[in-house]
Image: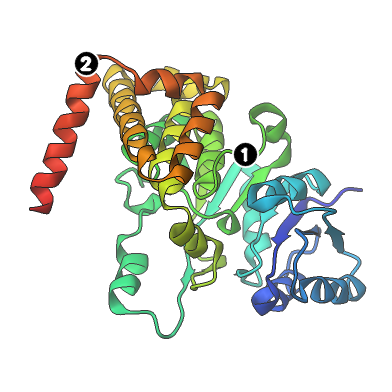
């Protein structure tokens, strides 16, 4: 029989915290699960650690990719290798509390398709007070969206939150989620056009179609550190993250078939807000693409891949006027 839950652990040079991550899986009070590890051609000793745990437990299934698939490609590879009814992602830096799977499994009984646990950031001891305050008090969570009246968030509420929090991860990181595997057949895999907000888009895509169930307990630890994928993305991919990812996400929300129910559930003003955001950000991306040859290559590739983005960058005089007003407003704020 297939396991009820597949814990999917995408690995790339994760030796520092990987043993703690894997041991937290084997320490679960709930035992009807498998562990799927996909190593994306690590150059450290991650594979040695994985093989050691494979020998320790028959629940562990270890796969090493023939070539580097990249962050999102490796996430999707984990999905393809899994056989469980439910998918529980866990990143190599993170770990589960002993009753985490028990709590998640109990929440599947009411027809949920996506379950999200309360955010639980694990910060280094030397974290400065400003950053500590951001993660502890200011980061967007389901509890501080203004719609937290219970642990069920409907498709309509998630759709409203998606418009109110464009590109802000109001749902949570993959390590804090669990979802029904079969829905991937309907809405698709993680989008490889995105690098930083790929998880937000995927779980938002589930949420606007199925809603979500919220667990107000801290069942998983999400580690923040200087070598994390998030930190590396923010320092190395500024143009793509600041300009390209927002328009790829909103292009999908406005035009992709997997967001049809989302577009039906939002009102006229919400659609207008999204459209103005999309078109003004397209103008921003186009203008900033000429700053470096690398930016220009990224912009040209995006325009070739997404016809609506190219059209928006050449849009009406009204959107251009709004865009110029936005630039002036931002400059005024800075001064």
Identify residue for label 1: 113
Q: Is residue 65 left or right of residue 300?
A: right
Q: Secondary structure at mark 2?
A: helix
Count of marks placed on residues:
2
Residue placed most toward the observer, 67 or 136: 67
Q: Nearer the viewer, mark 2 or mark 1?
A: 2
Name the image quarter holding residue 25: bottom right
Question: Which residue is located at x 13 percent, y 46 percent?
Answer: 331
Residue at x 73%, y 57% (from the top left corner): 7
- The numbered dot on residue 191 is none
286 with respect to 1 (left or right) = left
Residue bearing the label numbered 2: 317
Image: 35 above or below 78: below
Q: Is residue 35 left or right of residue 204?
A: right
- Say which label, 2 or 1, has the lower sequence index: 1
Residue 139 position by quadrant: bottom left
Residue 179, image x and y in percent?
64, 44
- Above/below status of 79 relative to 91: above
Taking depth in this image into account, of 81 and 48 the one nearest to the observer is 48
Image side of residue 323 versus residue 111, left or right: left
Q: Position of residue 311 (x, y in %)?
A: 41, 17
Residue 87 in view of the camera: no
Viewer-closest of 277 and 110: 277
């Amino acid at each position: 029989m297939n396991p009820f839950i597949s814990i999917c652990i995408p690995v790339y040079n994760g030796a520092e915290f990987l043993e703690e991550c894997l041991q937290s899986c084997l320490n679960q009070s709930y035992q009807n699960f498998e562990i799927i590890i996909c190593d994306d051609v690590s150059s450290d000793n991650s594979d040695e650690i994985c093989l050691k745990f494979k020998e320790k437990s028959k629940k562990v299934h270890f796969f090493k990719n023939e070539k580097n698939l990249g962050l999102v490609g490796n996430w999707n590879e984990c999905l393809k290798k899994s056989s469980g009814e439910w998918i529980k992602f866990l990143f190599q830096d993170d770990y589960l509390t002993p009753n985490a799977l028990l709590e998640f499994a109990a929440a599947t009984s009411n027809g949920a398709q996506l379950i999200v646990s309360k955010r639980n950031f694990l910060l280094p001891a030397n974290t400065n007070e400003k950053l500590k305050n951001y993660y502890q008090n200011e980061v967007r969570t389901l509890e501080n969206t203004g719609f937290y009246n219970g642990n069920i968030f409907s498709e309509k509420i998630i759709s409203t939150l998606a418009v109110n929090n464009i590109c802000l991860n109001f749902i949570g990181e993959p390590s804090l989620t669990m979802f029904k595997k079969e829905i991937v057949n309907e809405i698709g895999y993680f989008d490889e056009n995105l690098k930083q907000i790929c998880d937000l888009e995927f779980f938002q895509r589930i949420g606007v179609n199925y809603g979500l169930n919220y667990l107000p307990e801290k069942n998983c630890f999400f580690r923040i550190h200087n070598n994390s994928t998030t930190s590396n993305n923010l320092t190395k991919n500024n143009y793509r993250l600041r300009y390209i990812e927002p328009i790829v996400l909103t292009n999908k929300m406005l035009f992709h078939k997997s967001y049809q129910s989302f577009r039906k559930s939002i009102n006229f003003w919400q659609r207008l807000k999204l459209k103005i955001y999309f078109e003004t950000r397209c103008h921003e991306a186009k203008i900033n693409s000429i700053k470096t040859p690398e930016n220009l290559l990224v912009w040209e590739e995006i325009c070739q891949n997404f016809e609506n983005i190219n059209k928006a960058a050449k849009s009406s005089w009204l959107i251009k006027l709004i865009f110029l007003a936005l630039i002036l407003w931002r400059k005024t704020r800075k001064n």
